[in-house]
Image (cartoon, rainbow, N blue to C red):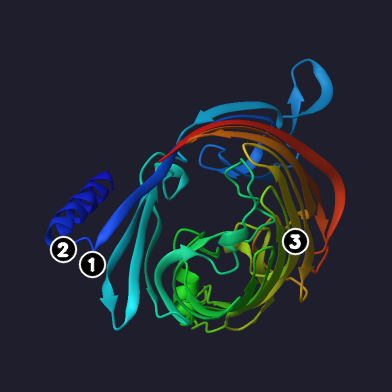
């Protein structure tokens, strides 16, 4: 992968010598960031703990020469990582059919899975054509449900998940803009952030459904006020055949909707967002789907989505010295139908999760230092036939993050 990006840079440099600067060019950007992290508990996370979702449930174990059971997941965990560091190229090209033609190629050293941490992965790679009122984006970019212009500015690399719908996806996105209003329609697939199913995490399920996710959104943006809303429809086909060798054509279907509002001045902003959704596993949220019926002859499964909701708020004040806070809450509402088989979901034994995360950031020039205290609590319990969880106990984790960054 490193060789691929080196050759990309060589091609860009050669192309720059072939075209005049008024037709073609590029700029390089990125940053180097190191996070020092300490947790008070084992967590459900990825990339050596860098992407934290929520604390793990109790793991009761015996202690030598003691009748008391001890929670093995309760204890300190420490790490230092620089794998979030990234680089990118913003490309400008000659006009295409009267449209301004631009592109972005961006990578980082985060890896694509937990087994290749430290290797280069593609974050964004897209072409953007701008005719003024009409725009067309083709490539890998933020999932439309993740509103990149108003993301939570937390220090932790989780960017507010599992309360924030998060993902970068291959897509084709059309946008119509008139003054402060934007309407967009997207066809989206999965790659680095896949759904899960009988064979684990894979883009296999949405590919076999034969239909991309369809997202429609609207944005209103003026100097101080930003409003946005989305509605997304998704189909998954978990299996092609049953264990009894019968064809299976059933699908799991889900709808996700979110809304966001932000107020901003030169030195203050506050953003609040709400989401209700089904089949939200690929967005790094709790939720997914489950088996609601099994045909006694063929073994064909019928599916039911798991409903979840999430609320979050992020606020920040200051310029060089910034004080901020993130608040998040997510609720598992169970499945739409009675569950008789397996769950293909995240956190199906969790009733709710909440987070309180204050931070302080200091910027000078291109250098930044920050500190954040991220308190996350999850309520675990037993679920009924419809997947509604009766909370038995809460566990909490406090993550302390110290970060140092230099931007270019």
Q: Which residue is mark 1?
A: 23
Find residue 382 and report its image quarter.
bottom right
Residue found 42% across the figure and 50% down from its top = 112
- Report the front residue among 393 and 108: 108
Residue found 74% across the figure and 71% down from its top = 339
The local secondary structure at tag 2 comes to loop
Residue 12 pos. (x, y %): 21, 55
Residue 234 pos. (x, y %): 58, 77
**Reading the chain from its start, which is encountered first: label 3 or label 2?**
2
**Reading the chain from its start, which is encountered first: label 1 or label 3?**
1
Distance (Cα) linking label 1 and label 2: 7 Å
> Would you say 304 lies left or right of 117 here?
right
Q: Which residue is mark 2?
A: 19
Instruction: Check contact, mark 1 vs mark 2: CB within 8 A.
Output: yes
Residue 388 pos. (x, y %): 82, 64
Residue found 18% across the figure and 55% down from its top = 11
Find residue 184 and report its image quarter.
bottom right
Residue 310: mark in rendering: 3
Distance (Cα) linking label 1 and label 3: 45 Å
Q: Residues within 10 Å of mark 3 (few under 14, many from 20)?
A: many
């Amino acid at each position: 992968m490193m060789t691929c990006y080196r050759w990309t840079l060589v091609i860009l440099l050669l192309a720059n010598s072939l075209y005049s600067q008024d037709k073609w060019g590029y700029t390089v950007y990125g940053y180097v960031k190191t996070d020092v992290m300490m947790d008070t508990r084992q967590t459900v996370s990825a990339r050596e703990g860098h992407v934290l979702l929520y604390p793990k449930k109790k793991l009761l174990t015996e202690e030598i020469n003691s009748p008391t059971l001890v929670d093995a997941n309760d204890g300190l965990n420490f790490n230092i990582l620089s794998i979030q560091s990234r680089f990118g190229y913003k490309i400008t090209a000659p006009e295409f059919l009267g449209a301004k033609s631009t592109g972005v190629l961006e990578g980082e050293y985060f890896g694509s899975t937990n087994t290749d941490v430290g290797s280069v992965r593609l974050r964004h790679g897209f072409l953007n054509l701008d005719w003024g009122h009409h725009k067309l984006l083709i490539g890998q970019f933020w999932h439309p449900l993740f509103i990149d212009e108003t993301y939570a500015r937390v220090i932790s690399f989780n960017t507010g998940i599992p309360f924030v719908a998060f993902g970068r996806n291959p897509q084709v996105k059309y946008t119509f803009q008139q003054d402060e209003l934007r309407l967009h329609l997207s066809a989206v697939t999965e790659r680095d952030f896949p759904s899960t199913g009988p064979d684990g995490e894979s883009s296999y399920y949405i590919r076999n459904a034969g239909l991309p996710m369809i997202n429609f959104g609207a944005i209103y943006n003026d100097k101080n006020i930003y409003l946005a809303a989305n509605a997304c429809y998704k189909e998954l086909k978990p299996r092609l055949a049953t264990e009894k060798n019968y064809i299976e054509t059933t699908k799991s279907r889900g709808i996700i909707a979110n809304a966001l509002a932000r107020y901003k001045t030169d030195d203050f902003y506050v953003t609040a967002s709400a989401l209700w959704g089904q089949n939200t596993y690929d967005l790094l949220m709790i939720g997914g789907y489950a088996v609601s019926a099994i045909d006694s002859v063929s073994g064909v499964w019928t599916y039911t989505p798991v409903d979840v909701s999430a609320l979050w708020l992020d606020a920040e004040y200051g310029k060089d010295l910034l004080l901020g806070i993130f608040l998040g809450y997510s609720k598992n509402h169970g499945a739409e139908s009675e569950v008789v088989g397996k769950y293909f979901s995240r956190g199906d034994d969790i009733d709710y999760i909440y987070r309180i995360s204050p931070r302080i950031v200091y910027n000078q020039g291109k250098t930044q230092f920050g500190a954040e205290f991220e308190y996350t609590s999850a309520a675990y319990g037993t679920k009924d036939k419809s997947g509604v969880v009766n909370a038995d106990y809460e566990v909490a984790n406090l993550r302390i993050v110290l970060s140092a960054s230099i931007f270019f």
